[in-house]
Amino acid sequence: MPRQSQLDSARLRRDLGLARARRLTVYTAVGATAFTGVFALVAATSFPGRSPSSAPATQPGSTDNGGVTQPGLSAPVQLPQQAYGGAPVAISGGS
């Protein structure tokens, strides 16, 4: 039976170390994926947002108001100004 040389022993240690690093990497990736899934599930059930379909557009039993705004909603007070044709615009940073 041939003896193992120091070179063979070093190769074996290297291969075993690489296998251990590969397993650690795979376990870490699987664990991170599982943690992300659990965290997303907890976040989704802890903070249930509102969906547009959950709030009715009109109160039950009421009729369409013919385009009149509902209480609490108002039109903008002033329309946005155009960049050109309005007040002068100062631009800095030029040379």
Image (cartoon, rainbow, N blue to C red):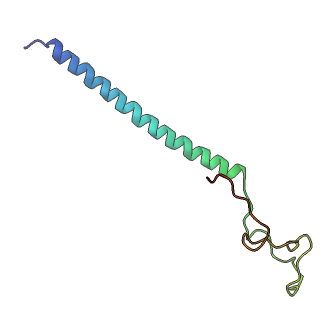
Q: Position of residue 27 (x, y in %)?
A: 43, 35
In this picture, residue 57 sits left or right of residue 62: left
Locate residue 41 relative to residue 74 in the image: left or right: left
Q: Is residue 26 above or below residue 95?
A: above
Q: Quadrant of residue 73?
A: bottom right
Number of marks drawn: 0
> Where 86 sits versus 90, above or below?
below
* Residue at x 52% of width, y 42% of height: 34
- Residue sitting at the far bottom: 66
On the image, which quarter does residue 63 sit in?
bottom right
Q: Is 73 on the left-hand or right-hand side of 28?
A: right
Residue depicted at x 87% and y 76% = 59
Where's residue 24, x and y in %? 40, 30
Q: Residue visible at 75% across and 62% down?
A: 50
Q: Residue furthest front?
A: 95
In the image, is residue 95 above or below residue 19?
below
Give me the residue at 91% from left, 69% from top.
Answer: 72
Most foreground residue, 93 or 78:
93
Residue 6, horizontal then vertical, whole percent = 17, 12
